[in-house]
Image: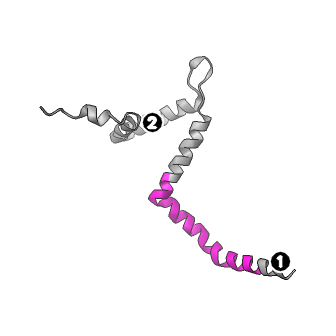
């Protein structure tokens, strides 16, 4: 009984100290480079888990959506297209470099 009351008091004190700061800490983390990387990784995992080929070899809904998003982003930012190509083919930059004799 005493232990339960003590646990409850400790829990309430921790909540009182941590709760006002927890949301601020989360927002700060998700705005950081590590937080952004985590969001990107989770989003990519989610989309990948839902991507499945359509019937008869046709593209599925999420594949079409992803291609549409990439198409729109590449139209808005030419460097985005290069980033996608480099992500899909790590040797792209090496193939573009002029070879020195």
Q: Where is residue 40 in the image (x, y as percent from the top left)?
A: 51, 48
Q: Quadrant of residue 4?
A: bottom right
Q: Secondary structure under badge 1?
A: helix
Q: Position of residue 31 (x, y in %)?
A: 48, 60
Q: Quadrant of residue 50?
A: top right
Q: Earlier in the sequence, mark 1 or mark 2?
A: 1
Residue at image location 33% in from the left, 34% down from the top: 91
Above or below residue 47? Residue 55 is: above
Q: Nearer the viewer, residue 54 or 86?
A: 86
Q: Are marks 1 and 2 in contact (CB under 8 Å)?
A: no
Side of 79 relative to 8 (left or right): left
Magenta stretch, main secondary structure, is helix
- For label 1, count other residues whose C-alpha is less than 10 Å away and answer few (under 14), some (14-19) or many (20+): few
Side of 49 relative to 91 (left or right): right
Query: What residue is shown with label 1?
Result: 4
Q: Quadrant of residue 57?
A: top right
Query: What residue is shown with label 2?
Result: 70
Q: Considering the image in quadrants, where does the C terminus appear?
A: top left
Residue stretch rendered in magenta on the structure: 9-37
Q: How far apart are marks 1 and 2 (CA)?
A: 55 Å
Q: Considering the image in quadrants, where does the N terminus appear?
A: bottom right
Residue at image location 53% in from the left, 51% down from the top: 39
């Amino acid at each position: 009984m005493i232990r339960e009351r003590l646990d409850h008091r400790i829990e309430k004190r921790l909540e009182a100290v941590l709760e006002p700061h927890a949301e601020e800490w989360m927002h700060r983390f998700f705005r950081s480079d590590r937080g952004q990387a985590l969001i990107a990784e989770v989003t990519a995992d989610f989309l990948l888990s839902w991507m499945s080929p359509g019937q008869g070899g046709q593209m599925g809904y999420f594949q079409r959506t992803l291609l549409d998003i990439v198409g729109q982003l590449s139209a808005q930012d030419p460097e985005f297209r290069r980033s996608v190509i480099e992500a899909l083919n790590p040797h792209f930059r090496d193939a573009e470099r002029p070879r020195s004799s």
